[in-house]
Amino acid sequence: MHEHDVLVVGAGGAGLRAAIAAHEEGADVAMVTKLHPVRSHTGAAEGGINAALHPEDSWELHAYDTIKGSDYLGDAPAVETFAQDARDEVIQLEHWGMPFSREEDGTVSQRPFGGLSHPRTTYAGAETGHHLLHTMYEQVVKRGIQVYEEWQVLNLAVTDHDDVEERECHGVVAYDIASGQVEGFHANDGVILATGGPGQVFDHTTNAVANSGDGYAMAYRAGVPLEDMEFVQFHPTTLPSTGVLISEGVRGEGGILYNDDEERLMFEYGYANNDGELASRDVVSRAELTEVNEGRGIEDEYVHLDMRHLGEERILDRLENILHLAEDFEGVDGLEEPMPVKPGQHYQMGGVECDENGLTCIDGLYAAGETACVSLHGANRLGGNALPELLVYGARAGRHAAGADMKEPEIQTGPGAKIEDGSIDAGVEIGALGGTDETVAADGAAVDAETVVDAAVQREQERVDRLLEADGINHALVRDDIQETMTENVNVFRREDNLIEALEDIRAARERYQHVAASDPSRTYNTDVLHTMETRNIIDIAEAITVGALAREEFRGAHWREQHQYRDDENWLKHTLLAWNGGNPQLYYKDVILEGEDKVYEPKERSY
Amino acid sequence: MSTLEQEAETEAETDAEAETDGPSPQDRRMAEKEARAQARERERQTLEEVRDADEAVTLKVFRYDPEVEGKEEPRFDDFAVPFHKGMTVLDALIYARDHYDSSLTFRHSCRQAVCGSDALFVNGQQRLGCKTQIADLEDPVRIEPLPHQDVVKDLVVDMEHFYEQMHAVEPYFDPDDLPTGEYEEQRQSPENREHIKMSTRCIWCGACMSSCNIAAGDNEYLGPAAINKAYRFAMDEREGEARKEDRMRIVEQEHGVWRCQTQFSCTEVCPKDIPLTEHIQELKREAVKSNLKFW
């Protein structure tokens, strides 16, 4: 059994930042990751990192923009902590050598982004995430932090106390992809889940193939509630054939959206009379799809994003990467013609419920980055707020897990934070088949840490053996079904009957999953086994998203419901939580905190 | 081998693991039967897709697995994949894996040429699978693992040596001192940023190293990617002098920059268009300059 003080699962931006922070606190930290760190999807982030660095800007304005962008579902303590710490984190990154784009005087450039009241998005060309990822990996190498690369974490080693808040996380079970070995990892002080987003729940996504949401599903089955999962960001500018992202930076620099009649749709049809193309992402995505639905889309599918008027010099200086993406993945020359774009799944606002220090309701279990829901983004994330999130909250989780003395959190987690129960009326069963899932936590209330890890290892070994030895169907069939129904029914526009249909399809997929097996019998680099494991996670996450979407009968941020066309603060100014509850999921709600340090953020109408 | 027809019969007999406390055995058998029927239906659909597609592309894919009968000796398998406009080599591989043979193994993640996972040897050249259009290739498309690296299985190579070389050049920023003002960054001129820009685009895919004859013959040669990483810091005006000197000693040692014979093969295959050979040449000049300094 491997043993470390702090284990970080996933080695993208949040994981790397957490590992560095824990290391600086003196912890023996190791990263366990199914991809080599530089392969992580943080590297695909393009636009930038928001931080209020200009003297005339302020963290208070950044916090206000973020809460407004969240449609008043972000928690003020999470947002204010974020806006304050983001400045230090960006400067820290620069001090680590990040090749930011620069002004003539050598200072870091900042550009306008959607929903921001000040140009505060720092960037490195249109490949900011790539540089952030490599800069932090360099610092991990410098510190000699151990990385178990191409080790897939299969499950958490958590005690099985009935009361979730008494459970403890003692480590993880991981599968060495190269050799097929299943081994235990004991964490003395904490496990930090930083496994990124769940884009593979949908088939048109900007996310990587590896983004199967493993962290969400493992935490969920171990007893940590998933929060606000119905809030899925659909990015307005993705390439139609692949879902490859075209950065918001294009619109930030002045790019314009046109419909088939060559009208500037954002103004022509009044979607955002002030901010136009730079309205919040949810607003622009709905605008584009409305155009398509009303017959003004191009080839009934997409709209055009035109940047030609910016001129070759400016495009090459600030958006060169976009030219390569449009050329390589859509065969379009962005200097000569407009680029086709349509909305695609991009980011999960909801996630593993945790507090400002990344701690969940299970002792020793943390979440950071996209996997986590503090909640910072509420119902809609602003562009440029994801990268600073993974810096700020990655660092905080790392420090806290390593035992640093930190401010008492204001955000409450776990069942104790419940204000009321929820329910959905879909006529479809959800959760584990038969209502129980015996694979949640350790057997027999084992509380000795190593026994808990050993028991978890044994259970995962049995799962792997069964997948290798049994005959069955290919998991890809099940994954396709989920992606298809989610894209069809739980997209930008949501209708009750469609959501119920999705739940039925997910249930059928879960039943079919009972019969999957890997047809590759090899222990060597068996990706068949890995992808089959991931598909199980995808099923749980798809269900959580759909349950939340069906429950929330209002229109807030990225969540649009046909029969409920307004934001209902009286009934719905609250977070949705879904607890696995041993396989019999329970829906409940908790309060949103809009009281900040010095002021209260009163919900206002959100217009751009 | 015919990959289109082999799967239909494999599940004729089932004795899947008993699910305790689940549905009755009869229900389970019915459900399994239904699942198999659906799988067969999908296979039929796949065959129809291949027939209906305007054209199909043939992939000839290298296969090897040290522990699976019939795969211990490397072989090539053919897959007929329905072609669509915009299809990449990676798309075609994913189709073959998900429809014909789920044991077909290759690394991939982002699908957009930034994670560097899927450098492959396609029709005799190092390329990223996700960035290579099938339409630009001659049929059949021959797909092999990167040459000059140990093959783990199918298209997966052992990257360990590549990572070791990347780590050998002290690939991290280490300034002599930092500004102390609140939220104060180091200054870097736009010109200097432009100077290092191309070198910072490296995605560690390993295509350059695989294409390099020198690296093939000298296992200790740092290789183009690692030298480019050293260049990225050597040319950054923010980098500390002490670390710059350290790093220069590493790149000018016996298996460093002087090994390069400027054949430009690395530059030709780099999917991010990094002028690797030029960077190596520039570091040679720097090495000469810094040696003169000590005379």
Image (cartoon, rainbow, N blue to C red):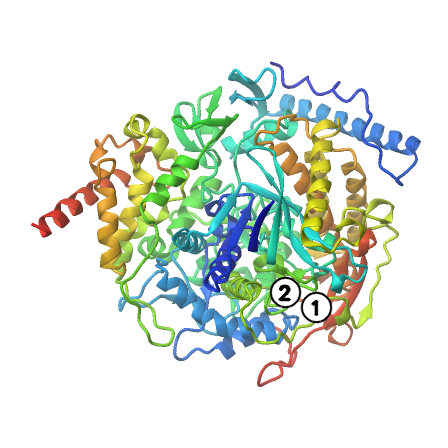
Residue, far bottom: A598
Would you place residue B55 above or below residue A441 in this image? Answer: above
The residue to which callout 1 is attached is A413
The residue to which callout 2 is attached is A359
Q: Is residue A141 visible?
A: yes
Q: Which chain carries label 2?
A: A
B70 vs B232, left or right, is: right
In percent of width and height, residue A267 lies at 54, 65
Q: In which quarter of the image is the N terminus of chain A?
A: top right
At mark 2, the secondary structure is: loop
Distance from Cα at disc 2 to Cα at disc 1? 9 Å
B40 vs B28, left or right, is: left
In percent of width and height, residue A29 lies at 51, 55
Question: To which quarter of the image does residue B194 belong?
Answer: bottom left
Dots 2 and 1: beta carbons under 8 Å?
yes
> How many numbered marks are there?
2
Number of the label disc, if any, that sits on residue A263: none
Question: To which quarter of the image does residue A272 belong?
Answer: bottom right
Q: Label 2 amino acid?
A: Leu
Q: Which of B68 and A325 is in front in this view?
A: B68
